[in-house]
Image (spheres, rainbow, N blue to C red):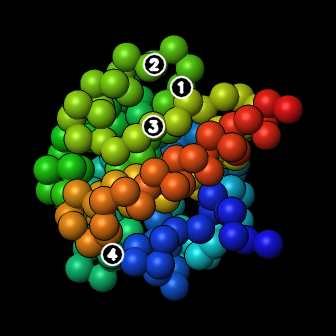
């Protein structure tokens, strides 16, 4: 029964395939994230990118179109807040969700102020992957709400579903 599934996108936002640009240089975290994305409905077409420069080249390519960008956020390399500003400035129609190491929450908040849509804390056990679907779809809904293609109030129902998911997870 998929009537209460947090992995589904509202029909006005739904695509046959969700095209994801995954920017991740850590193999373990990349595998966890990729495995979670492969369980999505709709299915994901994942394009991997190991770093910011490669991601920017893929975004600039005329044949590459993405529905969402999922990027790790690193304070010590080019995938920091300035990278978020560049992404959201040059590709404002692409929702941006960040994967953040524990202890970098302040950096994530800076990135949100710079235009990122949401973030998840990457725990070593990979528990963040259970919320990945919800966070990506919520970012897409919010971006579409902002652009006026989904009627206001549609996310509230899904936020309630999210609260139910968290309660069931803790049980």
Q: Which residue is mark 3?
A: 119
The dot on residue 65 is 4
* Residue 49 in view (yes/no): no
First-in-chain label (4 vs 1)? 4
Give the x, y percent position of residue 163: 62, 40
Q: The C terminus is located in which quarter?
A: top right
**Secondary element at image label 3:** strand
Give the x, y percent position of residue 116: 30, 42
**Secondary element at image label 1:** loop
Report the residue at 21% width, 35% height from top.
114
CA gap, disc 3 to disc 4? 22 Å
Q: Is there CB contact under 8 Å for labels 3 and 4?
A: no
Report the residue at 69% width, 51% height from top.
31
First-in-chain label (2 vs 3)? 2
Which of discs 3 and 4 lies nearer the camera? The answer is 3
Q: Which residue is mark 2?
A: 104
Q: Which residue is mark 1?
A: 101
Which of discs 2 and 3 lies nearer the camera? The answer is 3
Front residue (pair 73, 149): 149
51 up-or-down from 60: above or below:
above
Front residue (pair 79, 18): 18
CA gap, disc 2 to disc 3? 11 Å
Report the residue at 37% width, 70% height from top.
66
Q: Residues within 10 Å of mark 1 (few under 14, many from 20)?
A: some
């Amino acid at each position: 029964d998929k009537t209460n599934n947090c992995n589904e996108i509202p029909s006005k936002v739904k695509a046959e395939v969700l095209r994801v640009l995954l920017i991740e240089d850590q193999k373990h975290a990349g595998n966890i994230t990729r495995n979670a994305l492969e369980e999505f409905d709709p299915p994901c077409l994942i394009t991997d990118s190991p770093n910011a420069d490669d991601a920017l080249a893929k975004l600039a390519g005329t044949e590459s179109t993405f529905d969402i960008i999922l990027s790790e956020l690193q304070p010590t390399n080019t995938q920091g807040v300035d990278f978020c500003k560049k992404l959201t400035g040059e590709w404002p129609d692409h929702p941006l969700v960040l994967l953040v190491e524990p202890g970098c929450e302040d950096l994530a908040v800076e990135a949100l102020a710079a235009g990122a849509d949401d973030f998840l804390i990457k725990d070593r056990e990979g528990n963040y992957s259970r919320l990945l679907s919800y966070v990506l779809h919520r970012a897409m809904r919010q971006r579409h709400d902002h652009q006026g293609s989904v009627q206001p109030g549609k996310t509230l129902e899904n936020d309630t579903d999210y609260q139910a998911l968290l309660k069931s997870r803790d049980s």
